[in-house]
Amino acid sequence: MKNHMKWAVTAFTLSTIVFANSANAIAINKCIRLVRNPQVRRETIINTCKVCMIAKVQRKRPGGVVGTPTQREFNLQPGTQLLLPFRGPGQTRISREAPCPSVR
């Protein structure tokens, strides 16, 4: 009985490590980063990839219409950054990122 318990604990530990590494790899591979600057109380999005990316940004403000965030879409060329136009209190998050459509 003890041997079965050791195997179960070992298997659980190894699976936890594998899933944790997968979750970290997903977060690391994102192209668009959201950086908060407390001195100017604004946020910047940065494209860290070598391709043009579209970033959809959501902003929720306190005391506003409940459940209705502001959504904006920005095109970012490779290696560029953009100071977001949102001012004042609120929560900002990147809701989606995708490569820019190819130009023909």
Image (cartoon, rainbow, N blue to C red):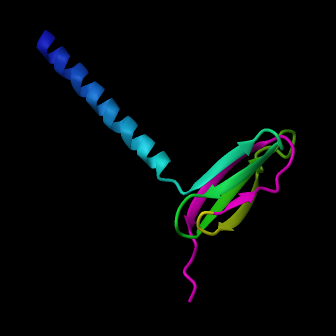
Q: Residue at x 49, y 46 (%)?
A: 27
Image position of 42 with respect to 97: above or below: above
Q: Residue furthest top?
A: 2
Q: Residue at x 18, y 16 (%)?
A: 6
Looking at the rendering, which quadrant does residue 66 occupy? top right
Q: Residue at x 65, y 66 (%)?
A: 76
Is 104 left, or right, of 64 in this rendering?
A: left
Q: Residue furthest bottom?
A: 104
- Give the percent coordinates (x, y) of residue 71: 74, 58
Residue 103 painted magenta: yes
- Give the percent coordinates (x, y) of residue 26: 45, 48
- Give the percent coordinates (x, y) of residue 56: 66, 60
Q: Residue at x 56, y 89 (%)?
A: 104
Image position of 6 with respect to 28: above or below: above
Identify the magenta region.
Answer: 80-104
| Residue 54 visible in the picture | yes
- Say which of 39 and 55 sits in front: 39
- Give the percent coordinates (x, y) of residue 9: 25, 20
Is 46 left, or right, of 70 in this rendering?
A: left
- Say which of 96 and 44 sits in front: 44
